[in-house]
Image (tube, helix red, strand yellow):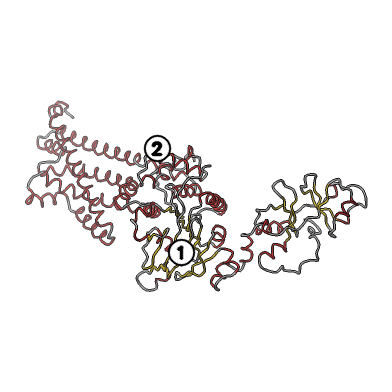
Amino acid sequence: MIRWDVIEGNLPLIAAKLGEHLALTGVAVGVGLVLSFGIVLLVRGRRRWVGPTLAVFGIIYTIPSLALLAFLVPFTRLTFLTAEIALVGYTLLILARNLLAGLDAVPADVLEAADAMGYSRVRRLWQVELPLALPLIVAGIRIATVTTIGLVMVTALIGYGGLGQVMLRGYNFRSDSLVVAGFVLTVALALVADLGLGWLGRTIAPWSRARRAGA
Amino acid sequence: MSVPGTTPAASVTFDHVTKRYAGTGSGDRGAVEDLTLEVPAGRICVLVGPSGCGKTTSLKMVNRLIEPTSGRILIDGRDAAERDVTELRRSIGYVIQQVGLFPHQTIGENVGTVPRLLGWPEPRRRARSEELLALVGLDPATYRDRYPAQLSGGERQRVGVARALAADPPLMLMDEPFGAVDPIVRERLQNEFLRLQADLAKTILFVTHDIDEAIKLGDLVAVMETGGRLAQFGTPEEILASPASDFVARFVGADRGLKRLALSRVGDLPHRPAPTVRRGEDVAAAVARLDVPADYLLLVDDADRPIGWVPRRGLPATGEIDEGIADATSPLFDRRTTLKDALAMLIDAGVQAGIIVNERGAVAGLCAVEDITAAAGRPPVEAPPPDETPPPDEAPR
């Protein structure tokens, strides 16, 4: 059923689209992280802004992806930017929520001790709060990445789509082999990202695993 | 153990310091009202009072975690408000009940926090961390590379103290540092703290709600009452002997006479001479030698170490005294035994007097229950017995 010769013949296409898939995902998560980090830092000092901000991100999150792309095309055309606006939009809720949860989970006594020892605000953020929030931040990146890998397929609608393009081509040319190849590779990509980031989340915080062993 | 630190201790002065919180009915939120007191360099001043009396607020105004509404706090004569806040904080040690160790850093890194902020080079930081871990009784090789989650509560508290001492601050602030550990560990940490302080002679502001801890640790005690007013400021002796108000009297407790006993030691009392007879001594000679008509004699060995009490009537008329006739002995005190402990031991043993021994274990005198109660500032419950050496209980246990 799977025709390896077809897959072999389309290897350059598959490789290019795999690269595009990675690029779309990486840029979306990266930009999403920077954006949500900045916004979280802005609203964190004023607690009553937190709810409305998350509400806005939640609304974006609920917009169906096809509808959002269709809505954006008149403004930004069939561009990489259009694809990324949609993809970044969907990462914001996940990333911002985990950033907030991670920063809020830093114990009050640790912050008090840091202040009392003479940490400046900025230094405290980088050297105490962010390192302690890291496991939850990485957990957020993990969910956002896996979600984005799936969403990238949809951007095939506007000419991107990464491996989604491979599957689309499979449909158009009645080639089950290409459909299966696109599907399997996407699932594999999501799986690798999930496992890899899961591993990173565990190793990045050696202190949290060091429970009284040998104490 | 080397004594780290050469920075001279700093004096702290509260000059009409007031902290008010916005909103009504804030009197119970830790406000402070016109606090004026002076802590001389090198002393431990304990701020004690019920919750909400502003003791923690007062402490946090020193390193400006809280800014006063009015008034000044002077550290060695310099107004804390005029100093750069991070520089000020790096020069003040801070220990809190929850310790606040950084969970993501090893114990060694935690202790080296302020030196790192001050930009000390890594080798010096490391050496300093290890020196301080040893100072607080934690083996550096064992603990240096562990994370806080791997330590017990008592161990974490020691690390907290080591971290606060790291940059050799002239002033330390401690907010209920021993409040979260069990009583046995607390007692040990308190004793270690006093031993450390005897060497370090830092100026220490110490907050607690426990009057016993205040009396035990403080050179000076500031009793604060709800509303943030200073109710009394003085030595523990002064506060126990003459409470300035009903509030202070109630706060220190009805047993304040008993608490005073914890402040005095057996060595502070005049010793009663002990009617000793030596093992092997001739009975007649011994009796003739004793000019006090004691009912009980204290039998000692050749090195004057106590063996036990001998009832006078039980003595043979002639011959040598041998230890077979010795009855029960009494609790042994040394000069450093607190009167509180001494009284507890006497009550426990059911006897009227304990034996004071010197460093070599030789009898130095006797200490009787009424000597102790007299020192507590109260008359004994019963009239003192006639002038005779108090015997052990007639029927020892």
Sequence-wise, the earlier of marks 1 and 2 is: 1
Q: Residue at x 26, y 52 (%)?
A: A96
Amino acid, disc 2 = Pro
Label 1 close to label 2 by CB (< 8 Å): no
In the rendering, which numbered label is found on residue B40?
A: none
In the rendered view, tell whether residue B154 sits above or below residue B236: above
In the rendering, at what x and y percent does residue B147 appear? 43, 43
Q: Residue at x 12, y 46 (%)?
A: A81
Q: Quadrant of residue B378?
A: bottom right
Q: Quadrant of residue B342?
A: bottom right
Q: Which residue is mark 2?
A: B123
How packed mark 1 is, by other alpha carbons closer than 10 Å (few <14, some 14-19, many 20 or more), is many
Q: In the image, B250: left or right of B339? A: left
Foreground residue, B115 or A157?
B115
Mark 1 = which residue?
B55
The residue under the point 49% across, 48% down is B158
Q: Judge from the rendering whether residue B167 lies leftward or rightward of residue B335; answer left or right.
A: left
Q: Nearer the viewer, residue B342 or B366?
A: B366
Q: Chain of mark 2?
A: B
